[in-house]
Amino acid sequence: MMHYTLSNKMKEEEVNRCQIQEWYPKFKSLSIKTRIHELPESFVQYLLDDSGPFLLPVSISNEDAFPNRIHNPEEADDYQVSEGSDDDESEQPPLPPSFPELELQVKESIESLGGSVFPKLNWSAPKDSAWISTTGTLKCSSFSEIALLLRSSDSLIHDLCHAYHSCCDKTSSRPKSFFLALRKWYQSLKPEMELRCFVRNQNLVGISQREVTTFYPALLEKKDSLPVLIEDFFVENLMSRFELENYTFDVYVTEDNRIKVLDFNPWGAFTLPLMFSWEELDQNCSEPGDNGVDLRIVEGHCAVRPGLKTAVPYDYLDTSPGSGWDQFMRNADEELQQQTRNAQAGA
């Protein structure tokens, strides 16, 4: 088996080519509608600042990141200083920041994209902070909601501080400029139809289900047709047009079998191989099979990869017979079967 040493191979150019502001203009006809804004350095520093209290920017449009919250007058008293107070000015609560020009640009883009978007920076989306939004998703309809998700995300620290960490020719810890990409929100997208594709030496060597923590019967039904569909798309649209030899790209397959490019990522480093390991993908490249591109999907309830949604790497989870995770998956499968029997009995 050939081993791929990530830290010795990756270059800054590979990482830069996968920034959304770099690839989207060239492949916009193959992707979903997106508006991109260069961020002022003051906003970047706002995202990085953890020295004081959590403050959302003042909205010049009076838009609230929590539009459904109930205002409690007693909370406001905590921030008021009575007249004649001897408190030193340095103890006054800091004034929240304001980014009026950026807010107006973002507001215009949201309206042009149908009223709802999901945000991401150069490479990453704030998926880890979706829980804090009013919908529990990345769906945003205002600048305040976007600022809330970005400011609350730990995963964006990668983009802001560590983007070139694995590059052998690293010259900086961050790009010169950061960009905010606002992507049109589609309520009807099905997570099972999002797939990650792996390209090595300009050849498609593997495809993986993107959401590996769930079993999707509909995806299993398309197991034979999807590799052919995606490989044809890759050869026709990407193979000779994307500038790198080694990379990954994420796609969404629509109900009528059209393919939309969602993202590009570098080969290795911070990119998850999902149902593969990087060693397996290298082996696929050096020892191509006769059955076409290798598609990996979750083929049963007990085959999900829970580690990608826990603080413990999957390789460290004990999934052997009799282990805690094995029992957990057995219980979950039994519960699902019982729910199915109950539903059939009530039909």
Image (tube, rainbow, N blue to C red):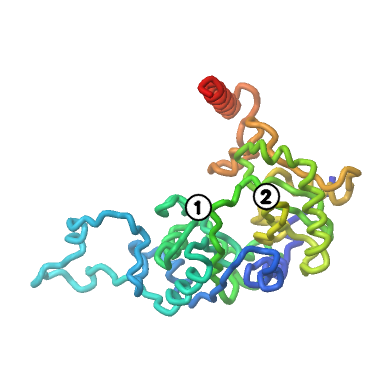
How packed mark 2 is, by other alpha carbons closer than 10 Å (few <14, some 14-19, many 20 or more), is few
Which residue is identified by label 2?
Answer: 255
- Which residue is at a point 15% across and 67% down the rendered structure image? 81
Foreground disc of the pair 1, 2: 2
Of 48 and 179, the residue lying toward us: 179
Q: Vertical placement of 210 versus 261: above or below?
A: above
Q: Do callouts 1 and 2 mark residues in contact (Cβ within 8 Å)?
A: no
Most distant residue in the right direction: 290
Of 69 and 93, the residue lying toward us: 69
Q: Vertical placement of 37 versus 145: above or below?
A: below
52 vs 86, left or right, is right
323 vs 129, left or right, is right
Secondary structure under badge 2?
loop
Of 120 and 347, the residue lying toward us: 347
Name the residue type under label 1: Asp
Of 170 and 92, the residue lying toward us: 92
Name the residue type under label 2: Glu
- Residue 279 seen from this side: no
Secondary structure under badge 1?
helix
Residue 278 screen position, x and y as percent: 75, 49
Residue 84 screen position, x and y as percent: 8, 72
Residue 33 screen position, x and y as percent: 60, 66
- Which residue is at a point 21% across and 63% down the rendered structure image? 79
Which residue is identified by label 1?
Answer: 128
85 vs 78, left or right, is left
How packed mark 1 is, by other alpha carbons closer than 10 Å (few <14, some 14-19, many 20 or more), is some
Residue 19 screen position, x and y as percent: 64, 68
